[in-house]
Amino acid sequence: MRTKKIVWIIVALVLGAAVFWWTTIKKKVVRNAVTNTVLKKTDSLYRITYDTSEVDELNGNIYLRNVQVKVDSAQWAVLIEKDSMPPVTIAVTIDKITIQGLKELKLLSNSSLDVSDIILDNPVFRLDKWVRKKPSDEKLNDTLEIYKRLVGNFDFLRAKNIQVINGHFSMFDQLRKEVFSANGINVAIEDFLVDSTHNYRNIVSYFIKQTRATINGFVGTELKTGKVLYDSKQHILRVEDLATIDDAPMKFKVVDIAGLSTQDFIERGDINARRILLQQPEIIIKPKTKKNKKPATMSFNGSVDSLVVEKGNLTIHSAKGKPVTVRDLSVLVKNVKADHGVIPFEQYANASSLAFSVGSVRIPMGLHMMNLDRISYPVNGDRLTVARMQMNPTITRQQLKDRIGRQTDMYTITANAIVLDRFDFKKLLKQDAIDIQKATMQLKLQVFDDKTLPVDSVKKGRGRFPYEAIMLSKKPINIRAIEIRNSTIAYESQAAKTDLNGVIFFTDVNGTVSNITNVPSLLKQDNVMKIEANAKVMGSGRLQSHWAIPLNSPNVEFRVTGDVAPFPMVAMSKPFENLSLTKIKSGTVDRFSFEINANRQGSKGTLLLNYHDLKVEMLRKYGEDSLEKKGFLSFIANADIRNKYQSDKGKEFTYKRDRYKSMFNLLWKSIFEGGKKTILIIH
């Protein structure tokens, strides 16, 4: 019995000594194992150091703190001397490495590692690119090179979970300039395995199937972002605050890719997905300059079932003048295919694959600014609608006098409820052609001309008729019809004689313009644009007019006929008072019809004006904006005019046009010329 006790005491002492010995040297064993493993498996290029370690052999856990992996300076000097540097090197600093579930400690000293978890806390990775004096024929990409040097020689490496917590990564070019940095990196990889059957391609597959990663943001030479989320299991990639870095930046609040083919994305960089959502993009387009020859782009290869843009803004700068701005742009394009970033939208611009809406568009047009509000082109439709179009002068009438100093028309236009039926948007994108079956709108048009200013005889195109723009356009145009409903047209002139303004206006305007085209093949079939319109003249007499305009006529000819229902002549008095110092006291138009044949040189035609009980007063200007009767001249004027006129035959007239004046001026002067031949006794 005594002998057995002694034996057990000896065994206990031996075990106690062994435990004491192991506790004393285990940290040294771990240090040597880790160091030797890195040394062996990285062709002696890298060295590893760390400050402290903890070993929990019962649970198979190891904790390393302040771990550093660096290039061995002596080995690097040899590589430099031999001009055999690798394309890239990496330096790593890790606050803490946790290895959990290590099955056997001895595995640290050989080419195998089998654990449940590897956790890297606050790792900092730095990658440097190197260029040899004599370029190597060996072509390795950066990630493959690092894999081969740090991991590729392990015979067996398995971890159920690998985590990177709050990492930082930076890349430097051969000039040691930082070209890329990412912070707040968090990565989780499941069921990681390296063995004789798992090569680099297999390692990449973990990012295809079993990885979730987030980044607080990264900055490159051309792009920068906010938060990034990549989840291979969910097949999603989400990027916040994505922006290009150049003089014409593109910004995206959110880029959300769903249904992503992670294999195509990881292996080739292609984006094949169910949907790409671009939220609140801000895109600026500038003309090419010496400084901005090649603006940054975000091109990609791939295909997407649905490309969605929500609430985007677009600014297009020109070499001269103010930019065009597009606000609150939303777009849906289906079945998109991109080749190196080129998306041929004309292939998708049809009723089944394209829809868009725009909150507003601002287009500078010389002295005017055009605004388009609430534009819509719905899915499965061929109708484009615009809630409102406005065009307003960008200067005041006084500024016209002070800055321009020449006669030029100032337009104020409002068009409501614009509808373009059977609008061929695909043809617009593909052929830059306008093709519309019918356009309808409600129009309010005001034109102002200051005749106190000298005529602008220098401005190119001054005095052209409006429809000449159709034939001068380089863009093919084919609009079968435009309908104007319940509209108003007014022409205001400031007379040189009186310095007062007179307005001639038409209300309740309804009409149709048909055959608006400059397409040669269509002009061969029918070259005449026709206008059928009716309106109230000065809120009184109903005008019915018919226009025939040969669009390709070399002398820009046109023909207008019209009839006006009976109306009181005093309705026309106000513009005559301010423009010609003549007041119509009384009179009634019984019949009024006309025919005008006009061209660039002038007009000729006939005018029939039957009326009765006409009396007028001659006026003179009194003060800045007041008029008073000139009694004696009024008596003479009434003696020189016919008080009434009745006939079945109209008076013929001719009028030589001032080539710098407008088409409206030509029509007004033609009617005025025919009216004088009827009313005046002495011509």
Image (cartoon, rainbow, N blue to C red):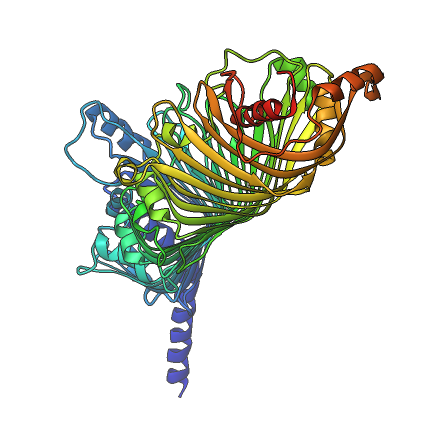
Residue 322 is situated, as x and y percent measured from the top left of the image, at 54, 27
Question: Which quarter of the figure is the N terminus placed in?
Answer: bottom left
Residue furthest front in the image: 647
User: Which of 451 and 53 lies nearest the eye of the viewer?
Assistant: 451
Q: Is residue 229 visible?
A: yes
- Residue 267 in the figure: left or right of residue 211: left
Residue toward you, 56 or 28: 56
Q: Return the x and y of residue 668 as percentages of the image width and height.
A: 58, 27
In this view, 569 is above or below 8:
above
| Residue 334 rendering spot, x and y as whole percentages | 35, 56
Q: Is residue 618 left or right of residue 660?
A: right
Which residue shows up at 29% across the image and 40% down it?
A: 522
Between residue 206 and residue 476, name the one nearer to us: 476
The image quarter containing residue 454 is top right
Q: How many marks?
A: 0
Q: Is residue 199 left or right of residue 298?
A: left
Outermost residue, left side: 137
| In the depicted structure, whether residue 119 falls above or below residue 131 | below
Is residue 255 among what the camera can see? no
Among all residues in the image, which is located at the extreme bottom?
A: 1
Give the image location of residue 657, x and y in percent. 50, 18
In the image, residue 525 sits, relative to residue 57, either above or below, namely above
Instruction: Residue at 70%, 32% (x, y): give it.
Output: 572
Q: Is residue 202 left or right of residue 631?
A: left
Task: Quadrant for the C terminus, please.
Answer: top right
Examine the rendered structure and indicate whether residue 639 appears above or below residue 378: above
